[in-house]
Amino acid sequence: MKQINIRRIDIIGYRTEQLYGEGYRGLFEVLNHEVFELGNTDILSYLNLSEGHIQDFCHFLMQDGYNNCIWLCKTERDLINSYLLEETDYIIDEYEIIDGIILSDLGEQGVLVAYRNITKR
């Protein structure tokens, strides 16, 4: 496997389960859905990874305890603006991740972070 771009992050981020769908956090499940079903190749580009190595990459991270991942926006305003939400229509949750691994960074539209532990604040 070629050199993979791994960047760690401590983040407090925001998300609404009404938009993203609660319960889908498994690393392999999410990456497969994002890349193969939604065609989000930005993940592959960000990590410098080819489609054929997603499973190997997931196993590599999971051996170190990174079993899950989540999309978060860096501010509540980013979440509202990026997804054209009405502030009163959605419950916005705040999460904290320490020592996460960035899988994709779309700026204001959010960051996909693999994590060992997550705290809902």
Image (cartoon, grey):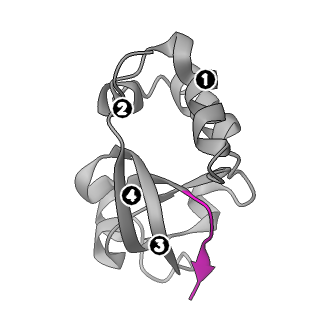
Tag 4: amino acid: Tyr
Location of residue 33 in the rendering, given as x and y in whole percent from the top left corner: 62, 31
Mark 3 or 1, nearer chain start = 1
Give the CA distance from mark 3 to mark 1. Answer: 24 Å
Magenta region includes residue 49: no
Q: Which residue occupies the extreme top position in the image?
A: 52
Nearer the viewer's eye, disc 4 or disc 2?
2
Mark 1 or 4, nearer chain start = 1
Residue 21, compared with residue 86, is above or below; it is: above
Nearer the viewer's eye, disc 4 or disc 3?
3
**Residue 34: quadrant of the picture:** top right
- On screen, residue 87 versus residue 26, left or right, reads left
Q: Which residue occupies the extreme right position in the image?
A: 23
Location of residue 44 in the rendering, given as x and y in whole percent from the top left corner: 39, 25
Residue of label 2:
47
Give the CA distance from mark 3 to mark 2. Answer: 20 Å
Give the CA distance from mark 1 to mark 2. Answer: 13 Å
Give the CA distance from mark 4 to mark 3. Answer: 25 Å
Residue of label 1:
56
**Residue 40: quadrant of the picture:** top left
Residue of label 3:
98
Counting other residues with Cα less than 10 Å from the Cα at mark 3, is it few (<14), some (14-19), or many (20 or more)? some
Proximity of marks 1 and 2: CB atoms separated by less than 8 Å: no
Q: Which residue occupies the extreme bottom position in the image?
A: 121
